[in-house]
Amino acid sequence: MAPPSRLGDKAFEWLTLAMALAVVLLVFLVGWQLARDSSLAIKRFGFDFLVTSTWDPVAEQFGALPFIYGTLISSLIALIIAIPLSVATAVFLTELAPLWIRQPITSLIEMLAAIPSVILGLWGIFVMIPWLRDYPFPFLKRYFGWTGLFTGPIYGVSMLAGGIIIAIMILPIITSVSREILRSVPNLQREAAYALGATRWEVTRIAVLSYAKKGLFGAVILGLGRALGETMAVTMVIGNTPQIALSLLKPGYTLASVIANEFTEATTDLYLQALFEIALVLFGITILANLVAQLLLKTVTTASTTRAVQ
Amino acid sequence: MTSTRTSNRHYWRKSKSAGVAIIAFLSAVLVISPLALVFFHLVKSGATSINWNFFTQLPAPVGEKGGGMANAIVGTLELLGLASVVGIPIGVLGGVYLAEYGSTRANWGLRFIADVLNGVPSITWGVVVYGLVVLRFKSFSAYSGGLALGLMMIPLIMRTTEEVLLLVPNGYREASLALGVSRWKTIVHIVMKTASKGIITGILLALARVAGETAPLLFTAFGNRFWNRDMAEPIAALPLQIFSYAISPYDDWHRQAWAGALVLLIGIFLINIVVRFLTRGRAATVL
């Protein structure tokens, strides 16, 4: 019998290596392409692009500040809503819930993660926005208007609505990653606290949550990365108005939304270049968020834990 | 005296624990409630518009009742086919490398980059493919849409493939190598074959994930109100059609949007159910 062919082995190894290197290539390809196609705009506006707020395609003046502001604020709102709910749900699923209910709820959360952004946006436009406009928004305006966060006319489409829809989008990922993190806490931790006479909540707080702090932080940053880049659902409910306003009831605009809305309408080269630069900014901040998140998660968990939830 | 204080305190600690349990339970209910709400409204507003025409007709012009999304449904399937051509070979073979070859350190880095790549916003892929393909060929096309979705699938499939290959016991590899089978044949015929269910699961999950993507298609596939006759021309897709109908001012189109969304979501859920069926008993290893 002929000995196994070394050539075939080498060829196969090189082939698979080339495919694995595709991920590295893709990161550079994206960065290079976005930088190349926005070079004119970068040269023309320089640093001002990031800190000025005039967005006027006719006068060819482009400043991305309102979009950066909108992206950050809507993501912040989403995190404020999603963090407590997700972490509490993860605690429920790992520490408190009866065993038989854990798997069904986990499956439901996976199904929530599977809902496409555009469908959530559709629901947002026709169900959530009218409801927000009729009940919670007038309430917020009436009782919390003095804070300045809830003033002005109520349109429904608003920064707050955008934040809420993003929160729904990132709830599943923060919940599942947090759940994996909490599951990886050694049982010895819990047993030691129980042995000292701690109640269930005290065990969770002292032995589990404080132990898992770093990983939970990673889960939150991962959620932030998703929030920053969320496009369709936000575009459909945030109102798409480039303005910087304190009131969360006013419409806003995000980096991802302006790309989605204006990309095919960009009539001049500079306009298109400015939009490419917006994509570059978005790519930069999401890569950064994901780097931090993965570093935090990789140092506390095994490979299977950081698997992105779909 | 002391004992009452202790028991009071004990009682307080117990009730605090119970209180937190209730809050945690309510949070879980709140987290899954959007799923129920969205599904309820999809069925309520969409089910009535789903009929034979919906699956066989082209979209009707404004003001005309009826019409369907046949072209968008077929378009989405075609785009998924094109995406598979890009995403499956690169993803699966890359996953093979991560599981079977390479050094621990280098693979840690590749895995890391794949996970970071997974977090890149989907709209970025649309913009990049627009710059690389659409601008060059001066036309929106099915090819570019498929490419954008395919690129998104690569890190997803790569990571799931790697994970299921690592589950194959080393004894299988050793037995095969000991019989004189070459390494690559061992990997293809023994390791990958053993893990084939898991690999397929990963592929299906990746397809389910990109099937609902709209943002990468906005400036690549672009959408089309008619049948696509040439892959180098714009093509309709279900998510794109839902989006353009949802933001239109016409009630008829809104109804179609709901119907399209219901069909799309049922399709995605069906894939997920198939996956669950394939992975019965070891849910934790996949996903």
Image (spheres, coloured by chain):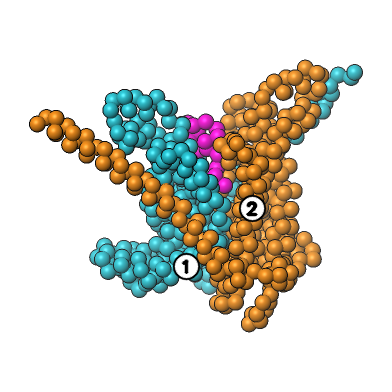
Label 1: which secondary element: helix
Q: From the viewer's perspective, is A198 left or right of B121?
A: left
**Residue A70 percent coordinates (x, y):** 43, 60
Q: Residue furthest bottom?
A: B63
Which residue ends up furthest to the left in the rendered image?
B1
Give me the residue at 62% from left, 65% from top.
B260
Q: Is residue A205 above or below residue A50?
A: above
Q: Amino acid at mark 2?
A: Leu
Secondary structure beneath label 2: helix
Front position in the image: A201 or B5: B5
The magenta segment is: A293-310
- Name the colour assigned to chain A in the rendering: cyan
How many C-alpha atoms fall within 10 Å of the one at disc 1: few (<14), some, or many (≥20)?
some
Is residue A124 left or right of A26 when viewed as pictured?
left
Q: Which residue is mark 1?
A: A127
Taken as a whole, is the magenta stretch helix, strand or loop?
Answer: helix
Q: How far across and down, in percent of the image, does residue B57 sit?
A: 73, 72
Tell me the residue at 51%/42% (across/down): A103
Q: CA distance from mark 1 to mark 2?
A: 25 Å
The answer to whether any part of residue A274 appears in the image is no
Q: Which residue is mark 2?
A: B270
Task: Give the x, y percent position of residue A176.
Answer: 49, 43
Chain letter for the orange part: B
Categorize mark 2 by other alpha carbons within 10 Å: few (<14), some (14-19), many (20+).
Answer: few
Q: Is residue A1 visible?
A: yes
